[in-house]
Each structure stands twice: as C-alpha cells, then as structure tokens.
Amino acid sequence: AGTAYTNLFFTNSGATKCSISGIPTAQPVVGSGHTAVGPVATVNPITTRGGLIVLAANNGVANVLYAISSADNYPNASCLPADADGVIITFNASIGSPLVAYFPMSKRPICRNLSSTTSAGVAAGSVSGP
C-alpha cells in the first residue's frame, strides 16, 4: 500500500535550446505494445510547477513528478486492479507536434476503473520532489 513518487526526466540532447511547459497527460501502460491501463493520471496542481521551462542546449534537463497510489488503497470492486510497467507522457504543443515520451518502470498494480495515478507540471532541472 502507499504511494510511490518518481521524477521523470527530459533531457535536451540538441545543439539549440528548447522549451516545454504545462502539465502533461500521463497514461499508465503495460507490455511491449504500451497498452493503456486505466484512465490518464489526475492532475496534481503543484503551484511551483507547470510554467515555461527553457532547456539549455546539450543536456538541459526538466522533470515531471509522477505518482502511483497502490491499487491496494482502493476497494477491489471499484478499482479493478491491473499491473502497469510504464507511463507515456504527452505535452501538447501549440505549434508543431506534441512531445511524447515513454518511461519504463517497475511493475506496479494500479486501478483500471478509477485514476490511481497523478502527474504534476514540468519543473526545471534534475532535482527531485515538488
């Protein structure tokens, strides 16, 4: 039981700076085909996250806080537990294509019938936490 928090890191490997902003969509997935498991994560509106973040050229870093509340925290009948072993993070773009990234993780039980995951907005750097 409990909640597992993790920071998901985005690194700019390009030769020019770039930017991301906002709170991404986070979809828990399972298997090599990245099949969606349960609903997208609920937004965690931490006020210090979500603004425009400029990533410096050649290894600028930003992160998103992702949390999984164990399926054991919910009644089985309303949760319908299933394992997830990854998450797909999507930042929608006002211009151009969205930024989509897959992050593998250790297999954990989540709810298929209600949201047991949360994501918070992007923050600068590689420092963990809110």
Image (tube, rainbow, N blue to C red):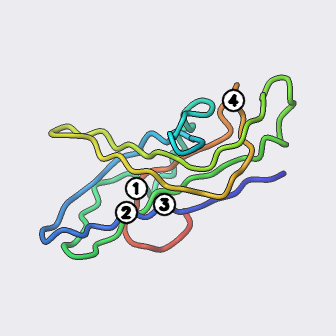
CB within 8 Å, label 2 to label 3: yes
Mark 2 and mark 4 lie on one chain; the one further toward the N terminus is: 2
Q: Write the residue at 71% across / 42% down.
A: 83
Residue nearest the observer in this picture, 58 or 47: 58
Q: Amino acid at mark 1?
A: Val
Residue wearing tag 3? 8
Q: CA distance from mark 1 to mark 4?
A: 25 Å
N-terminal of the pair, mark 1 or mark 2, is 2
Q: Which residue is mark 4?
A: 112
Element type where label 2 sits in the image:
strand
Place of residue 31 in the rendered image (x, y in percent of width and height, measured from the top left): 58, 43
At horizontal 75% and vertical 44% (from top left) the residue drawn is 109
- Going by the picture, which residue comes out furthest to the front? 32
Alpha-carbon span between mark 1 and mark 2:
9 Å
Q: CA distance from mark 3 to mark 1?
A: 9 Å
**Residue designated by label 2:** 10
Residue drawn at x 80%, y 53% as measured from the top left: 2
